[in-house]
Amino acid sequence: VSKLRQNFLDYFDHKGHHVHASTPLIPKDDPTLLFTAAGMVPFKPYFLRTKTGTDRATSCQKCFRTTDIDRVGQTLRHLTFFEMLGNFSFGDYFKEDAIHFAWDFLTNKVGLDPKRLHATVFNEDDEAEALWKKMPLKNPIARLGADTNFWAMGATGPCGPCSEIYYDLGPQVGSGPEDFLGGDGDRYLEIWNLVFMQSDRQEDGSLKDLPAKNIDTGMGLDRLSLVAEGKTSPFHTSLLDPLRQEAAQILGVAAPSADIGLGKKESEAAMAYAIISDHLRGSAMLITEGIIPSNVERGYVLRRLIRRAARYGRLLGAKDPFLHKLTPTVLDIFGETYPELGQARSQIEDTLKAEEERFLETLEKGEHELSRLLAKKPKTLAGAEAFKLYDTFGFPLELTRELCAGQGVAIDEEGFSEAQGKAVETARSGWKGSGQTSKAQYEKLIGDGLKSRFVGYEKDVVPTKILALLKDGNIVQELMPGDEGEALLLQSPFYPEGGGQVGDAGQFLDDVEDVQIAEVLDTQKPHPDLIMHRLRALKKLYPTRPLRASIDKEKRRTTAYHHTATHLLNQALQQVLGDGIRQAGSLVAPSRLRFDFTHGKPLSKSELQQIEKIVNQAISDGIPVHAQERAASDIAAFGATTLLGEDYGAQPRFLLIGAGGWEQPKERFSLELCGGTHVANTAEIQSFKIVKESSVASGIRRIEAVAGPALEDLKRREEEASREKLRDLIKDFVITTSKIQSVTGKPYTQLVNDMPDADSAPIAEIQAAITKMQEVDKKVHTELANHKRDKLMEQAKLGQVLLEVGEAKLSVQKFSQVEVQSLRKISDQTKRDLGSGVVFLGAVDNDKLSFVVAVTQDLVDKGVDASKIAKAISVIQKGRGGGRKDFAQGGGPDTDWETLVKTVKDFLS
Ligand SMILES: [Zn+2]
């Protein structure tokens, strides 16, 4: 196992650097980043001087890059997970020391050959070049352009020249025109980048000297291991090779020991093993941080890794899930450095196995579908088809792309995005304007400078006026009574659908008289500045008409119960399941709420009870609810719950549920960013109940719940359903028992008389009665089935022909409309009745005759063989027959019955 990591940290420790442990891959304070992608990320506050106290630091930081997933395996440079070694100076040492440390470490500590090392500088950085010249370099210093040797944090802010150190892997690795310092070839590998942060880029593009200059360096551990271990590929170092070897052991296909000079088949295997080793390591690291495969955000990245690795495993011949078997190898390599891996071991194994199993199921269906599509030899695969593969078969686009590329077929990716967009729109049920036409019209409204202001946090009714009207998606100058359309108002108290909360309904009133002029059915926000009211006009409406806009307060109120309850639920889930869960979607309506979140397995009954209890406790505690727009920096300062990938702007609205208010924002029950409408105190919600817990997608659970008066409603509806069910059961029961009575004479009327009254009895009695009825019903049905069989036996007895052949008794009978299975039962019974003898039964169905032959044991002992009889019959019948000595069966075309009976008789005489 690589000691380079520790040697590096020790080296800089001795040079007075503070050694920082790696921070998690999920950046804690920066919700805008999916993953930490560079070693300097955790040190940003020091570079920006918002944090002080350390002048020089060093770290080995876990990093993850999502942009490279598709390229892993195709090049020797791309990896998803990697470890970045770095040394940092915050206004302390600068170029001279940074250059000296780097050269000293590489040549004296790692022992790299100076003849292979190349230093580069930014072409305007004479200072760096002069400093490098003091080192015992063997190669000339290369001056390179800004594309490789100038670094900037953003369009403005800190920036500066870089000095990159390259390692020459030799001409056998690459000798093409792209193999030069800073080129795309594989020969010269950049191993260490020293950034000299010396300037501050101004708005006008000019550079100002930073008052305190910084050093930020980064060296990938995989690349350092590659050169230190004398390899030519990162997949062959002690960091990844053991994974390749173990996978090869499991799959039984050798992993090529080099990546150059391979034949086609070998290079395909090399690529597959490279992908498997990189993706497996990355997956294990992500799972360790609580990420679960899903279709959103980080979960989707993890899903892609596992599925891509699984897919390449299949190309190597894997039939069953195998990725989880590599977990011990990951622990061997990284367990000591990252003890959290060991703690998550079973989670890693379970997650890998479950996801690979799911993938294999869909893969088979998807591959079948794709090969059907490709069989038509298209030049381009239609976007809609690619989306169908994704949507219906869970086939990732990347995979479709790869498989199509293998056959020289392109994918209409624009069409894919379009189909995806459409599906999202369709999924969001209900009104969304009138499609494409109105989208253009909305843009026209914006272009005309029209916009509406939302005033619904403070007011239920406001005087306002109509700015514009739409009908069938087109801007119109009036709506007549009875017309349906959309209205844009100057200001509006109507909450437009957003953040999961449904849009407001209500009415427009005349500006003077108490007369309703329009009924508002729904409110949407097709553009941040447009609140569109979908309405039915009751009086003539026209732009500039003054009116009073008044929301349906009851709908708003019952929706608020559910919205605040959603926040309580989110918090309760974190308390019970851990703060690794993430909201994945929500719906807040007047009658119910729905909350989707990431979690790998179903919730237990006791977990659900705990969650319900926490929410109900928060409700009975009567906690005040506060909403306020505050600076975005408070998100991190207060540790607010945010949605991944949401852009909250500079002044987001905070929703705080806490007795301490803004004085003590950390002593709270919940703090989220939210634009929705809420109750003022949790006590208003009264009660909360979870009605369903289910799965929406793998790794995503859904809780449906009701709160407030809606809960009473729900109870009433459930009660009514129970009463209806009892009525139905009694009705069915009467019908079934009347059949029984007609065949067995058994009366069941007493039971029905004892049943409680379905309309008026207490609900507990109704439920008990339902249980009892269901039991009795089952019994009655069994009885009816038994009775039918008895009846058949009786018939059989009546219809049988009993022959005496020599000393043996032969019972023969031909049935019509009797299932073949029944013949066996009848023959068993008849055999018992005969005591000693042979039974031959036939059943005709259309043109087919099936038969059974049964022989009692005493005759079997005397040499009578049912299977021989059956074979003889089947010969005559031109069908099939066979079985044991005591029982045989067969069948074929319908044949003269007497001839067959005679055949049986011949066997006995
Ligand atoms: Zn909310």
Image (cartoon, helix red, strand yellow):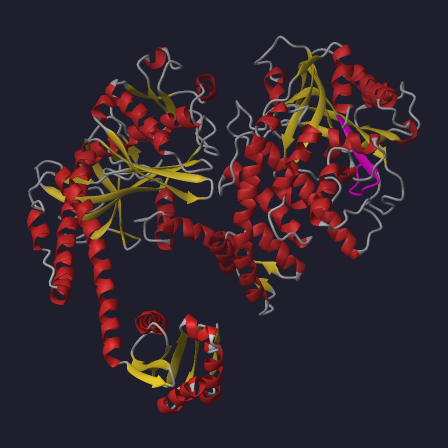
Q: Which residue lies at the image location 57% right of the left edge and 40% below the top edge?
A: 352
Which quarter shows the N terminus? top right
Write down the region rendered in magenta.
181-193
In-image side of 138 versus 673 (left or right): right
In-image side of 665 versus 493 (left or right): right
Q: Quadrant of residue 888?
A: bottom left
In-image side of 383 versus 735 (left or right): right
Is 571 in front, or is 898?
898
Q: Is residue 892 above or below residue 386?
A: below
User: Does the rendering let one see residue 422?
Assistant: yes
Residue closest to the far front: 807
Q: Which residue lies at the image location 89% right of the left edge and 18% below the top edge?
A: 134
Q: Position of residue 437 (x, y in %)?
A: 36, 54
Is 620 in front, or is 146?
620
Q: Position of residue 77 (x, y in %)?
A: 74, 39
Q: Position of residue 757 (x, y in %)?
A: 7, 46
Is 576 in front, or is 504?
576
User: Does the rendering let one see residue 652?
Assistant: no
Q: Is residue 898 above or below residue 851?
A: below
Q: Quadrant of residue 490?
A: top left
Q: Position of residue 266 (x, y in %)?
A: 78, 53
Q: Which residue lies at the image location 85% right of the left edge and 19% below the top edge?
A: 104
Which quarter shows the C terminus? bottom left
Residue 190 among those drawn in magenta? yes
Q: Which residue lies at the image location 41% right of the left edge and 48% below the top edge?
A: 424
Q: Is residue 704 above or below residue 357?
A: above
Residue 709 among those drawn in magenta? no
Q: Tally the marks.
A: 0
